[in-house]
Image (tube, coloured by chain):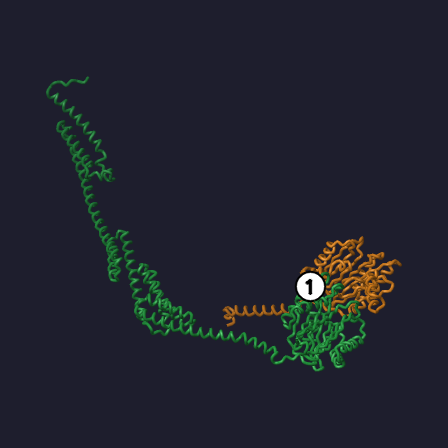
Chain colours: A green, B orange
Amino acid sequence: MRKNSIEFKTGFTSEAGTYRTNKDFFAYVELDDIACYIAADGIDSDEEVRSAELAVNSFFECFMEKPTMSRRKIKNYIMEVHKTLIGNSTSVRLKASMIILVTDYTNMIWAVAGNARLYFFRNGGYSFRSKDQSVTQMMVDAGKVSEEECNFHDERNNLTSFMGQAKGFKPYISKKVKLSDGDSAILCTSGFWENIDNLDLVDALKEGKEPNEVICELEDIFLSRQNKVINNYTLAALFMNKVYKEGPKQDKRIKMAKKIGMILVPIIIVASIGLVVRSVHKKNLANDAIAYEKDGDKKLKDKVYNDAMKAYENAEDAVKNLKKQDDIDRVDKKYSILQNIIEGDELFAKQDFENAKKSYNNALSYLKFMVEYDESSFDKEDLKLDIQSKLEDTKKCLQVLDLSAQGDKEAENENYKGAIGLYKSGKTLASDINYADMEDKLSKKIDEAEGKLKDAAAASDGKAKEDKQFKKLIEDIKSDRKDVDDFIKEGDKLAEAKAYEKAIIRYNSAIDGCKKIEDLLGSDDNKPFKDRKEIKELKELKDLKDVKTKLDDKIIDLEKLSEDEKNKEQGSPKPSGH
Amino acid sequence: MIDNYLQGPYIYVFISIITICVLFYLRYYLKNAKKEQYIVIGNGQTVGKRDEQEDNFSTVENEKGVLAVLADGMGGYTNGRISSSIAVNTFVEDFSSAYSIYPIEDFFRNAARISNRAILDRSKGLRSGTTLVSVIITEGMLYWASIGDSAIALFRNGEFINLNKKHIFESELEQQYISGKISEAQMLNNPMKKRITSYLGAEVLKDIEMCEKPIRLTAGDKVILCSDGVYNSVTELEMENILMERIKPFDAAEEIIEMIRAKNFPKQDNATIIIIEVCH
């Protein structure tokens, strides 16, 4: 209990001045280990609510619940008071200026809202005063108004911040100030300090032995000015004759240091252990990474790519945990080379040569970047040649496929000879690179193409024969027709010569000729030509039927004539039809 | 040679540099241009539950500055409306016709005396009178004068600053109480405490309250003149809320008057308000 070891004395007065009501308020509380003194000035025009008293009571409600020297908490209490004033503003906005002094009898802090003031004295002399939150104070700070002038300056009550302010309220909370024996403080509202100067305060403190004596002295000085208007004023004097001395053990700083030490030491130990474990783990990881990488390099040299890739994969995991970018990049590139080679191989096996080519090219480009690393663990040139060889094979395979496709195109255009040539080139190439599958396919294609070629030749022979036959038919028809015509001509001549019998024979021969032509067209061999255009348009055939009919008629006529002639020769008259 | 330069890309570079310089100058000019202050005035009025509008007001703006005057004719006396009208007209005429309004304290005092005499002459022995509040804003400074219980306030940074006192008997009672002549009960229970002690139209004109020093106005300040019909019906907080809105003074005045009308007090007095806003 600090209060037993200290000597703090307080005296105060709060008066209405020339006003009917006193809107100022002063209150204090001295607890065992902490004390709080508040002077407040109600600066609103509300006649019913005493804003200063409300503000002070509201602050003490918070403070008594949790007495504290914490600046943050005191600020929170002040903000609570501010909210209380706003909440209680019904017709008029409640406003108050306030000065708060909190002490643990060893240190003190003060808080200001508005222009209520704290004056502090040490060794009987003026030490400092709290700064107002007013326009005048701003001018003082800017050097435009002197300290002496500021108590009477026009803008002293033009406040920049006060409790109950509509917006922008920001109280000032001081840092801790260590107290000494014999220190004294005066808390007052503007109604007092605007009529007094610092010298009056110092004089009164020197003359007065007790706080109340100082108050009386100051009030006398104040009232002796005989101002026409005296505002509400509040004045409190606090004598700190003996402050509480904190011994080394009680020194809060040491206590705080111990507390911090107690917290920090375990943290440091845990952190150190953590760092050691981490360091060992890192070392192991580094060893693993090196071992895996070497293993990968060896397998790469032996061209056991799958195993090499697994080794690099493990090396990459280990290196990533080490977080060494250079190592990560190097292993990653090796891994990528192998990944692309294996991928290329798989695609090659699946005969996806285009993508295989891409993978091999990627592998080559990664290998190219490997130049920047000083790497002698595997023969880059050897690997390069291997990849290039694979790439070459892939290209040849692509070429075989290309030749096959070209051959197919030629075959489609019935250029079987060209197709066979391309197929054969492809087959030779496939044979060179042991591309057995394609070799077989191309052999089949060659056979197929050759077959087609033969068929084409055979088809060509048949047509020639047919053409010949057709030609012969035409010629036969023409020849037979000529014979028919010749017979008719001869028949006609014989008929004119009245050699009817002979004429009939000729005509019959002509009819036989016609029949022969018809038989010729009707024969099985010539049936395919029957509907040909050339046959249909053949003039020798066009009037064949008519000729035949005419010949029949002529034969009948000639037979009659021949009979008549015979009858004439025998002398027997031929019975007349009449 | 010069032609070659003008034909080449140099002309574009030159134009660009000139343009940039002009833009920088404009920026500097606009940033440092002195913003002129100007005044926007709004007002509102309601007759309340009275038979006649006895409040009177006027605002004048000329090369000398801005004058706003508001008078509340006293309904308890005859010719209240005429009294307020005489007071307002006298102030306006004096302000308009005066060669110089300086010193402004004298202007207020003379205008008040002339008004007082004119009201007395007009009343012909009958008791009549008016309160009066008046402000002059010139060269960015606010001067004010008050007789009676009408109010002048400055609304700055969201806070109300009452500028004048109310010249009512309650103030005298307070002084008597402070000096120990009467008890607190006597002071509080005096039925005449709201009686106006100073007004225009009195045989002996007293208590012309004027500002001790002019107040420098800054942008955003609002000067409010109102009759008791306003401040007795609308609380300071309600007025604060309206004045804090980003609306024109005329709309703010209208809103306050509407609020009075909405409250519909059975004995609503004439209510008049003038709001003068300093803008830039």
Location of residue A76 (image quadrant) = bottom right
Question: Where's residue A189, x and y in %?
Answer: 73, 72
Q: Nearer the viewer, residue A167 or A572?
A: A167
Q: Nearer the viewer, residue A385 or A307?
A: A307
Residue that sits furthest to the right in the current view: B125
Q: Nearer the viewer, residue B85 or B157?
A: B157
Q: Which residue shows up at 80% across the image and 54% down it? A: B52
Location of residue A522 (image quadrant) = top left
Name the quadrant of the C terminus of chain A.
top left
Q: Chain of mark 1?
A: A
Residue that sits furthest to the left in the current view: A570
Question: Where's residue A53, x and y in %?
Answer: 73, 67
Q: What amino acid is found at the position of numbered circle 1 in the picture?
A: Ile
In the displayed structure image, the side of residue A531 where residue B259 appears, left or right: right
Question: Where's residue B279, x and y in %?
Answer: 69, 64
Residue B111 appears anywhere in the view = no
Which secondary structure, mark 1? helix
Residue B6 appears anywhere in the view = yes
- Please tell me whether residue A416 is drawn above or below residue A237 in the rendered image: above
In the displayed structure image, the side of residue A440 where residue B59 appears, left or right: right
Residue at the disc numbered 1: A86
